[in-house]
Amino acid sequence: MVGKGIEMKEKGGFSLIEVLAATAILIVIVLVMSTIFHQSSLAWSAGYRRSGGSMMARAVVGMILKDLEGAVSDSQYFLPADTDIQPTAITFVTLSGTPDVSGKRCAVKVKYSYAGDVTRESWQMMAGSGYGTWAPLSSSTIATNLSEFSFQTPIGYVNNGVLPEWVKIRVKITRDVDVSKVGSRSLGPDGVYVLSGGDDIRSL
């Protein structure tokens, strides 16, 4: 009696070593791609912060320059102390608002100071109240997260109530914090400063 033979066919597939090798290669690819993504994310974040910081610095300097463009000094109307420039603070009188029918504008004393944040304070001259008399007008923080904010004047300039030929403003933004806060304030339609409530418009 002859037994029937059984034909064994070899099935194709991957060995354990091949699977492990492919897994190791995949892990390396994933690690490389995650590293590239992380570096790209850091570069984008740094660029975004620099862009935001640059915009903030331009906004703050632009606000100060706008006030400085109308700066005046006249011993007949203002005290020497109304014009004062220090390394981290500047005080001066500027003409603001729209000229009236006679061409005159309102005199406002402005002070920008830095102590971690940049603060803008202003006072309006009180009509008929005497020489160099000012009434509080507004006070607000216009920028935060600055590592340096300073003013420089020509060598030899003396604070004697006279404006210098030029004022150099230096602004340095911190790198490790959010630098997107820039603020301003409007007195609203009634043109009157109110500590709380009213129709004043304020950001920051």
Image (tube, rainbow, N blue to C red):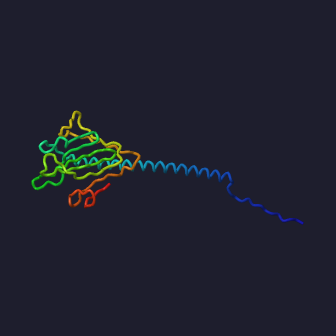
Q: Quadrant of the N terminus?
A: bottom right
Judged from this view, the residue extending furthest toward the left is: 102
Residue 28 pos. (x, y %) = 57, 49
Q: Is residue 163 above or below residue 200?
A: above
Q: Nearer the viewer, residue 82 or 1?
A: 82
Judged from this view, the residue extending furthest toward the front is: 129
Residue 111 pos. (x, y %) = 24, 46
Residue 146 pos. (x, y %) = 34, 45
Q: Nearer the viewer, residue 40 or 107?
A: 107
Residue 37 pos. (x, y %) = 49, 51
11 lies left or right of 200: right
Q: Is residue 142 above or below residue 163?
A: below
**Residue occupying image coordinates x 20% and y 60%:** 190
**Residue occupying image coordinates x 27% and y 60%:** 197
Q: Nearer the viewer, residue 86 or 42?
A: 86
**Residue occupying image coordinates x 28% and y 51%:** 140
Q: How many marks?
A: 0
**Residue occupying image coordinates x 21% and y 57%:** 192
Q: Nearer the viewer, residue 5 or 136?
A: 136
Q: Quadrant of the C terminus?
A: bottom left
157 lies left or right of 175: left
Judged from this view, the residue extending furthest toward the top is: 156
